[in-house]
Amino acid sequence: MRLVPSRMRASTLPAFFLADDAKAGEPRLRPEDEQHAARVLRLGVGDSLVGLDGCGGRHPLRVRSLHRGSFELEQAGPAELVPGPGEAGADLPWFEVAVAWPRRNRVEGMVGRLVQLGAAAIRPLAARQRGPEEVPGAAAQRFERVVREACKQSGRAWLPVLEPTLTPEELAREHAQAAMAALDPLAGLSFDTWLRSLLPAPIGLGTRARPIVLVIGPEGGLAEEERNALLASGAGLAWLGPHVLRVETAAEAAMAIAAVVHGRPR
């Protein structure tokens, strides 16, 4: 498998995820992707596509035969390996977005946009004033579907991690070695200034072991004990703008700014 810089991975070919149980040399798409390729895009014999394994692999494929909506695929060239977030040559460091879950009808859109913007990990934050929406204890199947669709749309070769729920206090303990900023409208430091203070990044920062963590509390704000726990762990407080934002707006704006400040231009 040939290693290529992330910025060279763009392709006009349609991309689909490979089945989890696909064997080496016998590429096969996930059932829902196969249906989309056959019924919506109407790919036929001889058409080219890219198979994604979710772990950085991009596999050039060709449709060898089609029978009742089921593809037989063949390799159309050497596979490429795109560096993962935080690795040498990657587009972005490892950004974890820890966010108090918004209302159910706004969650999927938020998750999809965070994936498109480059979040390496998304974690529900169980804050005291999180509002009426339950925080999921584990990644729901519908979120995994949203994540895959967002990866295909944005050209990402790595699936982001849907992390388990933590309270702000637990997050502070788990990420004692990370660079962490919590959004706070009363903070004296702007968020982009905080991000730029991490440049050039010390060796090891921005990896999964030492992520850059963006903490977005509920619209009611973090409780004093939660804020103190984050500060005690070395987290900073950063100001994003003059208005009170919806949770998902703040999360997406923060990730967008982070991608601009720390991203590699194509």
Image (spheres, grey):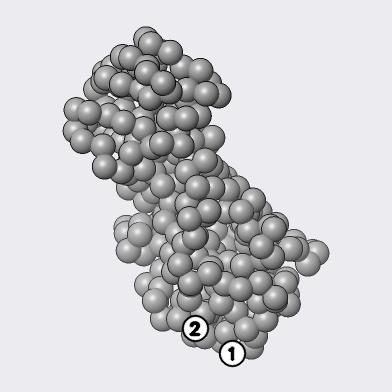
SS at badge 2: helix
Residue lying farthest to the top in this orientation: 46
- Which percent across, then down, holds residue 109? 64, 51
Disc 1 target residue: 225
Report the front residue among 96 and 262: 96
- Which percent across, then down, holds residue 120? 44, 53
How dense is the environment of label 1, judged by Cα within 10 Å: few (below 14), some, or many (20 and up)?
Answer: few
What kind of residue is marked 1?
Glu
Report the front residue among 8 and 187: 8
Residue beneath the point at 35% across and 57% down: 207
Distance from Cα at disc 1 to Cα at disc 2 = 8 Å
The quarter of the image holding the N terminus is: top left
Residue beneath the point at 60% across and 48% down: 113
In the image: residue 104, left or right of residue 140: right
Residue 190 visible here: no
In the image: residue 100, left or right of residue 5: right
Report the front residue among 198 and 106: 106
- Find residue 169 and name its label: 2
Residue beneath the point at 46% across and 17% down: 43
- Which percent across, then down, holds residue 135? 57, 72
What kind of residue is marked 2?
Glu
